[in-house]
Image (cartoon, helix red, strand yellow):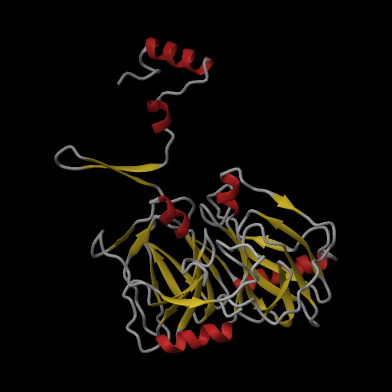
Amino acid sequence: MATAEADPRMRDLEARMAAANLRGQWQIDANRPQNIRKGANGQVFIEPSPAGIPHVWRWQDMQKILQNALEAMTDSYTARRALMFTNPKLQRGTTQNLVAGMQAVKAGEICWAHRHTINALRFSIQGGEKVFTVVDGRPLPMEPYDLILTPGWSWHDHHNESGREAIWMDALDVPFTVGMNLNFYEEPGDIAQEQNKQESLPSLLYRPAHQKETSGAQPYRYPWKETLKALKALENEPADPYHGRLLEYVNPLTGGPALPTIKCQIQVLPAGFTGRLHRSTASSIAFAVQGEGRTMFGDKEITWGKHDTVAIPNWTWHRHINPGRETAILFTLSDSPILTTLGFYREETEDSAEAMPRPAAKLTAAE
């Protein structure tokens, strides 16, 4: 096809189109990030380029900067000390649909109540029974490595009644929700909600007759001590050659992912594990709970250790390796529920484009 540079008629056409707020398909394709391959018989294969790049945020660096934030920001009433992981090659977010980061809260502080359509979670790093998040009136303790969900449009505020700073990892579907232009937000006017001191969620088997049927994600806490029990039950299971052993956090009301837009899993890499190459259309974020290892992205190697966080872009070949003698445990989250719902999820392995990993074991919330 003639180009505007070579043919004055094309220049005139494109000028008239621009004046009429029109754009030709040939102009759009030229700006679309994609990989194009051609087969021997004239076939054309187009696939997306990964959004963002693999990157690691190291715990030793985060500790120092979080301490700087605690000293520079004397309170968290006007702005939260949430330091979000920004992918070097993205305008916003850690991956294309998700953003994660770390937040520090001083002893005695309350992070004000609010709600938003964004789905979010907290994975506790430094906490205890006197550190808690109130979700729709329910106080949920944040002991180390507990997972706390704050589903979209649920009221939530954070409290630190302990004697030291609390630190947790935040993860939200901000890039997706903002990209869809669906970010609603509210504050109740009071800094904190009234707390419902009931011991746990009402039974899933019963509900008051006047209460409407619930649907979608509800606020839950997944205590780490229960997660460890579930992992113990899996320790004699063979490791998947691509993923190691997987345990998925599930919503007990639906049997689906913990949040409608975010899948949460524990990934166990046994000592000496060398994973095989794979990629998927989902992007993911991995937080190292225990151990150390490395992740290979083509010819790029990222090493990681305890409490480091790694961004894994969509459609990027990678594999995890644990060369040590200690089992490595990763808390991983991905945007696969979005893609699965829309029919966009696919996965390829080094063995077969059709091969799929063994399904993860399921873990429901204990509260």
Left or right side of 155 for 91: left
- Residue at (46%, 57%) from the top-left corner? 313
- Percent of width and height locating residue 237: 35, 85
Q: Judge by depth and name the residue closer to the eye, 250 or 64.
A: 250
Identify the image quadrant of residue 293.
Answer: bottom left
- Percent of width and height locating residue 167: 69, 73
- Residue at (52%, 70%) from the top-left corner? 251
- Residue at (80%, 73%) from the top-left corner? 106
Q: Judge by depth and name the residue closer to the eye, 201 or 329.
A: 201
113 above or below 141? above
Can you name the residue that lies furthest to the left here? 41
Q: Is residue 298 visible?
A: no
Left or right side of 357 for 57: right
211 above or below 126? above
Left or right side of 117 for 235: left
Quadrant location of the N terminus in the rendered image: top left
Q: Judge by depth and name the residue closer to the eye, 138 or 290.
A: 138
Q: Is residue 1 visible?
A: yes
Q: How many numbered dots are placed on residues in this image?
A: 0
- Percent of width and height locating residue 291: 50, 82
Identify the image quadrant of residue 25.
Answer: top left
- Percent of width and height locating residue 125: 64, 77
Quadrant location of the C terminus in the rendered image: bottom right
276 above or below 316? below
Q: Judge by depth and name the residue closer to the eye, 194 or 181.
A: 194
